[in-house]
Amino acid sequence: MKLEQLSGKKLLVPETYGAVGVDLPEFTPPHASYTVHFVCSGSGQVTLQANGKKWISYPCDGVENVAEQITDKTPQTVSVTLSGAARWKAAVADGSI
């Protein structure tokens, strides 16, 4: 699983991967948005939460996805949760898609 759309992006959270859910390290975006790049393979779904609130869910189909969050320049948290048996990879980039 590769995150090919990360090329040339400034990372706020480096590529992280796993087979269970996790809270990514806290970060503060220097601009008014950030983008999570992620991919999940296996069965089930991957769900992202931003600052403790459900954000988006995608099937674990091996396709790279991106999700943009517009926010203030305050500390942010992103959590990855899984349903089913799956593996995921995610990274947080500064700015918009």
Image: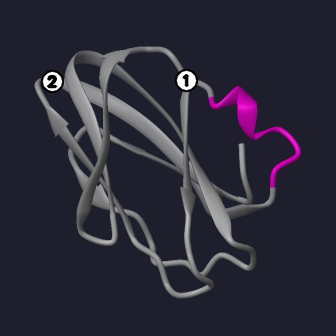
* Image location of residue 45, percent across then percent down: 22, 26
Task: State the residue position of label 1.
Answer: 64
Amino acid tagged 1: Glu
Whichever of callouts 1 and 2 sits on the residue coming sooner in the sequence is 1
Instruction: Classify mark 1: residues with Cα within 10 Å, few (<14), some (14-19) or many (20+).
Output: some
Vertical comparison of 5 with 67: above or below: above
Instruction: Identify which residue, 82 or 96, lies in the foreground.
Output: 96
Q: What is the quadrant of residue 42 in the picture?
A: top left
Horizontal side of residue 38 vs 73, given as left or right: left
Q: CA distance from mark 1 to mark 2?
A: 18 Å
Looking at the image, the residue that sits furthest to the bottom is: 74
Callout 1 secondary element: loop
Vertical comparison of 55 with 63: above or below: below
Vertical comparison of 6 with 21: above or below: above
* Image location of residue 16, percent across then percent down: 49, 51
* Image location of residue 35, percent across then percent down: 61, 51
Q: What is the quadrant of residue 27 in the picture?
A: bottom right
Residue at 74%, 59% in the rendered image: 95
Amino acid tagged 2: Ala
Which of label 1 and label 2 is nearer to you? 1
Vertical comparison of 30 with 94: above or below: below
Task: State the residue position of label 2.
Answer: 85
Quadrant where the image shows the C terminus: top right
Residue at 73%, 31% in the rendered image: 5
* Highlighted range, magenta: 3-9
